[in-house]
Image (cartoon, rainbow, N blue to C red):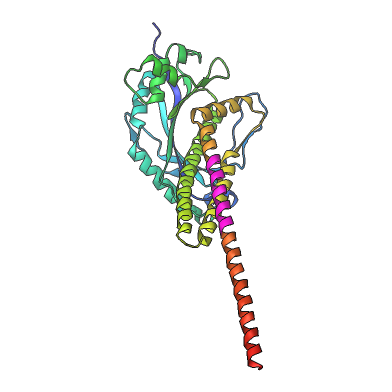
Amino acid sequence: MHSEPVIARGACHVLFAYEVAQAIDLDAAEARLAAERQTVKHKRRAPAFFEYRPPPLRVTRPGVAHAVGNHATAPAADVVVYDFGAVSVGYEIPLAGPLGALPALADALWGHAGLLADSRRQVEALLGALEDTAVRPRIADSVEDYAIFHIEAFTEPLAGAALWEEYGHTVAQILRAEPRALSQQEVGDALSSRLAFGPADATFIDTDAALVFDAEGDDVLAVLELVNTQLMEMRFLDEQLDDALERAYEALLARRRGRHHGPDIERLAQLQLDSAILFEQVTNAVKLVGEQYLARVYALVSRRFHLAEWDASITRKLETMDSIYSKMADRAATRRMETLEWIIIGLIAIELVLSLLTAFGSR
């Protein structure tokens, strides 16, 4: 019978990702916020080519401590600002004590209204400070939250493999925010997305939470925060495209009733351009060349978040929008040609009438 592991040092990072603007000028915002550029801290033997493009800004904003079950957050919020108009607000809860106490914390974090409300207030205050450095500012209704349980060390040495071989049920409860017992099937699914760099570390990634056992896990945390933000942006963009396609379909129906297409085409073209630019920025926010372990982390969390499916859905909708735009533009061009032809016919008719009147008048 193995004794329960006891956490000596660690923290739970609670993240909330928001869409706040079409784009943010990071160079101008850096001075205004007195922020610093965030880089991925490489602590493993690998080429340092896993980097943000461009590096986002990180700033610590004052706040209040929030009670979460038997724990409390630090009285501050870490805010990361991305150039593609997204913001991630993070809260830190110090961890120490039995590993078996974490499922209760995960359960208390689930849908925590106080942290959600405070994160939105932090975003509103940040937008006020950004002023004109944010292009077309607005705070979207949707938010993507995620919890990362980062354990730096246990009181007694523990192999990373022990977390899934001996304490897998507890880890699954943490990932699923479920203090009650889970089935073996549920445990197996929760633990299926895992990886390790060495014998003394392990990373488990699930849809709503991750557990990172690593004395030097800042780089993994940064990747998880980025992908959570990318997921939020893809969800936001997918919803925007759904609304745009519905409006475009209504515009096509309106055309059959004789309404002019010009304003609809302009709005559709602008939305198509904005969506394509945002999609390109989000999907190219990080360079994956060379850093093998972090690239594996990124690939694993992307699969767990189904980013490939979101990517395919957005690509398909952008192609559909392009097709609708082309059809609307072709119809508008045909309508202009028809109008021009009728104008020419009218001018010819007028010229004939004037010629006949001139001929009759000269008799």
Q: Position of residue 59 (x, y in %)?
A: 51, 43
At a point 35% along the width and 32% down the height, the residue shown is 110
Q: Would you say the magenta stretch is mainly helix, strand or loop?
A: helix
Q: Position of residue 261 (x, y in %)?
A: 51, 60
User: Compared to 250, does 78 lie above or below?
Assistant: above
Q: Is 156 part of what is drawn in magenta?
A: no
Examine the image and state in which quarter residue 190 appears: top left
Q: Would residue 13 be seen by someone viewing this image from the given angle? A: no
Q: Horizontally, is 165 left or right of 355 in the view?
A: left
Q: Which of 248 and 161 is in front in this view?
A: 248
Q: Position of residue 267 (x, y in %)?
A: 52, 56
At a point 50% along the width and 13% down the height, the residue shown is 161
Examine the image and state in which quarter residue 94 appears: top left
Which span is picked out in magenta? 315-331
Q: Is 322 part of what is drawn in magenta?
A: yes
Q: Position of residue 127 (x, y in %)?
A: 47, 52
Name the outermost residue toward the bottom. 363
Q: Nearer the viewer, residue 352 or 313?
A: 352
Q: Would residue 43 be seen by someone viewing this image from the given angle? A: yes
Examine the image and state in which quarter residue 349 appears: bottom right
Q: Quadrant of the C terminus?
A: bottom right
Q: Which of 19 and 351 is in front in this view?
A: 351
Q: In which quarter of the image is the N terminus?
A: top left
Q: Horizontally, is 21 left or right of 107 in the view?
A: right
